[in-house]
Image (cartoon, rainbow, N blue to C red):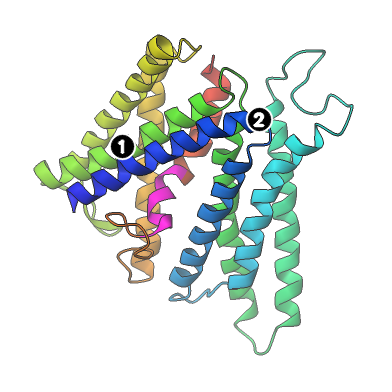
Amino acid sequence: MLSTRLVFGFSMVGALLLVLCLDEWFAPWFPVWFVLALIVMGSASLELVALLGETTIKPSGNTVFAGVITLVFANWAPHVTSHFLSTAAHGEFLGGYDPLGPVNDLGWPLLAFVAVVMGAFVVQSLQRQKPGETIAKIAGSIFAVAYLGLLGSFMIQLRWFHGAYHGILPLAFLVATSKGADTGAYTVGRIAGRHKLWPRISPNKTIEGAFGGLLFGVGAALITAVVARYLLHAPTLGWTAAAGFGVIVSSAAQFGDLMESMIKRECARKDASAAVPGFGGVLDVIDSLLFAAPVAFAYWLAFGP
């Protein structure tokens, strides 16, 4: 199990880096990143609907899938429209780079989310048959779209951060730190785990594993800084900032993993699906990233080069 997880984990990270590098040819459209986001977010939405179908909220599969895909499209909207408008609404501020541009870009998926919320009310009201089901379906659908679509938007938007290689560096820091934390927590927990971390949420996770995840996450962030500084010769986080990124983002990543574990326990399921060997489902792969991405986004805005 551990060897399978490591092999597929490193393979997925390598494939992601290859996709990001190839997509540089198509900046700032990033069509390969767009297709990857559609596949990953769409697959995760189907898994989440199947999970929540075991609970009392039972979200609408069509509403969740359409809502998540709508938010993916909305993430590209500011970057596409900026090339057709002569205004300085995106990426320009008094003739230069606008440091708040990434925050402004999040307004598009936020507006799309509002439209999805309103649409969910209308659709479910038209499908209403008996008391007690409609509000639960609306709540479940909105929850699923917010969990995947809104949190996932922070990860998608990192691709357009200003700097060398566009947003590859902040994305590399995010993925390396989050997956380093996942690997460290799993490995150290399997080898030395003795004390349960949060048994009501995830019976197999341990305190020793959590510390291992923290150390691996910090190490991954520092290694990424070394590669960026000495191999790519690109502006990157300083050593203290990189270590801080590792501590904060790896902690958020582990909380993300725990929160998805809570969802699965509520649904009496061990994995979201069996789509990814060694991990479970697509949702099991990105769960840590969903919580880590907003933290990484804010950290890079504050301390990024």
Tell me which segment is drawn in magenta. 281-289
Element marked by disc 2: loop
From the top left corner, tell me how far across and down residue 23 is, in percent. Answer: 58, 34
The kind of residue tagged 1 is Ala
Q: Main secondary structure of the magenta part?
A: helix
Please tell me whether mark 1 or mark 2 is closer to you in this view: 2
Mark sitting on residue 222: none
Q: Is residue 197 visible?
A: no
Q: Which sits earlier in the primary sequence, circle 1 or circle 2?
A: 2
Q: Is residue 285 magenta?
A: yes
- Residue occupying the point 21% across, 35% down: 212
Residue at position x 44%, y 43% in the image: 289
Q: Residue at the bottom extreme? A: 130
The x, y position of residue 281, in whole percent, is: 38, 59
- Quadrant holding the C terminus: top right
Helix, strand or loop at mark 1: helix
Give the label on residue 27, or none: 2
Q: Is residue 236 visible?
A: yes
Circle 2 residues within 10 Å: few <14, some 14–19, many ≥20 = few
> Residue pushed farthest right?
86
Q: Is residue 75 above or below residue 171?
A: below
Which quadrant, please, contains the N terminus? bottom left
Question: In this rendering, would 162 be left or right of 243?
Answer: right
User: Which class describes the residues within 10 Å of circle 1: few (<14), some (14-19), or many (20+)?
Assistant: many
Tell me, for residue 181, which label it has, or none. Answer: 1
Q: Residue at x 73, y 52 (%)?
A: 112
Give the distance between the C-alpha atoms of the residues marked 1 and 2, in whole angstroms: 30 Å
* Residue in the picture at 36% in, 49% down: 257
Taking 53 as reference, is 183 left or right? left
Q: Residue 223, percent across and down?
A: 32, 21
